[in-house]
Image: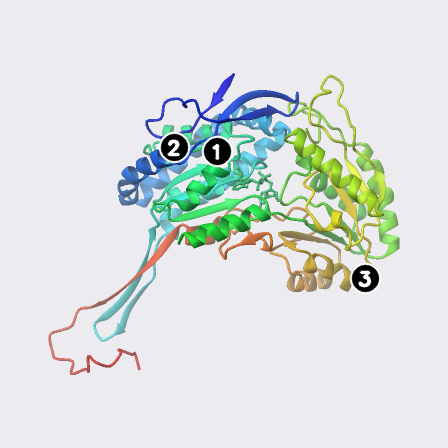
Amino acid sequence: MRIIDHHIVGHSGGGAGRTGDVFDPNTGKVQARVTLGTKADLDRAVAAAQAAQPAWAATNPQRRARVMFRFKELVEANMQSLAELLASEHGKVVADAKGDIQRGLEVVEFACGVPHVLKGEYTQGAGPGIDVYSMRQPLGIGAGITPFNFPAMIPLWMGAVATACGNAFILKPSERDPSLPVRLAELFIEAGMPEGIFQVVHGDKEMVDAILDHPAIAAVSFVGSSDIAHYVYRRGVDAGKRVQAMGGAKNHGIVMPDADLDQVVSDLAGAAFGSAGERCMALPVVVPVGDKTADALREKLIPAIDALRVGVSTDAEAHYGPVVTAQHRERIENWIQTGVDEGAELVVDGRGFKLQGHEEGFFIGPTLFDRVTPQMSAYKEEIFGPVLQIVRAPDFETALRLPSDHQYGNGVAIFTRNGHAAREFAARVNVGMVGINVPIPVPVAYHTFGGWKRSAFGDTNQHGMEGVKFWTKVKTVTQRWPDGSPDGGNAFVIPTMG
Ligand code: NAD
């Protein structure tokens, strides 16, 4: 059985420690085992990071950026094999896996501009003979703890910005699809990054706790489900670290009566069912405004859902593949049952779906509910599967309140031809990322990604300037070069510029 091991400087082969199963969701078979590391493994990674980081931080930012340029070229040259590797452990179709990698590369492109964004501020003559300037310095060693659903993009959200800023970065990827992150670490080395600057440690809660408690790790960036995000945030902050912790989501798409319904249906099919709904920016809730809109939308949605093709990751015609584990499929199916028990109308039932020739794969068919209400737990909680819920709203104000009052506040979309309604919605909705006729409003790499409420703990977003702020600290220097004449000031009074 293939063992997926840490990528730690000087580490050669795991011992007799614990391992976790890594499945091929297409076949349902265990295809590899991943080493589940310990505090001792982390200590080795931290020691290597400590040895390498000062010289990396002292390397001029243009040279660090050149590593990013070369890394980007290497990933592009290896795109097909990387996407196939990713898809074989995650289950998403290969074209979507390429998108996962490409969105990560876009953050690498942003990181190529790091010399520009690290420039500080300068004030000449803040007082007589006094200048003030500030600089952004790396934190030292940072860690990233990432979820299974974007094994390329999310590690690069964190790792590209952290390392370009001069930090050493230790990644603890999801134990469900750990191979691609190791390949990223190998490609960074090939691109010229010194050993010890981008390392990978595998593991579960034991490793996460070791990271959170490690005194030499200055910052932790986490993405995953909300309860774990909250736990990571509290424990990391308690240990004196800087922490950003992104959590779960339940994104709504508001459909106004004037929306182009054919376009909405096409957007919804991709946003609700793409990647089997395993995206934190999926659109699992659609809110048509008015019963007429709801009925028309439902009528168009049913044939669109019937036309969806569920297939193996390597099927170029498939719209989406299996979910990540059998356990996750069971969880999704249980949520479907809960929806039925709570009184929602099950319009299309994806349970029990079997793909011919792949009967043991973790497949689940697309599912549609109508007449879901805000009181139902199946509405309140994240399902993270190919399940779309219609929640009917009588008017704009009710539609606006639904995502605003929901416990999650990651993304939201409005579909309309009315600029005023769109503008009002964007200004008033209590959610972090808004799409106007854009179903999955994931901001581009040079803007920032982050939800509100239980979708994010901490106050800095991922990538863009917020990412640079997270991975650096500001030092401000006040310098005085007097001309030699006595200033006659009173050194016992706090200096002011009055
Ligand atoms: P998860 O919370 O199970 O795991 C995330 C990470 O936490 C993994 O590295 C895992 O090993 C670790 N972990 C798991 N249990 C732990 C525990 N008890 N203690 C400490 N660490 C633990 O999440 P997942 O299932 O891998 O990913 C799906 C979730 O991530 C969904 O809720 C999704 O919405 C969310 N997500 C959020 C964003 C965002 O930016 N807001 C992006 C992607 C995914």
For mark 2, give the secondary structure: helix
Instruction: Identify which residue is drawn at 84% across, 36% down.
Output: 303
Residue 449 appearing in the image = no
Disc 1 residue: CB within 8 Å of ligand 1? yes
**Whole-Å distance between the Cαs marked 3 and 2?**
56 Å
For mark 1, give the secondary structure: loop
Q: Which residue is mark 2?
A: 41
Q: Which residue is mark 3?
A: 395
User: Which dot marks residue 203?
Assistant: 1
Residue 277 % position (x, y): 68, 39
**Whole-Å distance between the Cαs marked 2 and 1?**
10 Å
Q: State the residue in front, 23 or 286.
A: 23
Residue 414 appearing in the image = yes
Q: Are marks 2 and 1 in contact (CB under 8 Å)?
A: yes
Of the residues under marks 2 and 1, which one precedes in the sequence? 2
Q: Residues within 10 Å of mark 1 (few under 14, many from 20)?
A: many
Q: Nearer the viewer, mark 1 or mark 3?
A: 1
**Res. 365 image quadrant:** top right
Query: Against 216, is 121 above or below?
Result: below
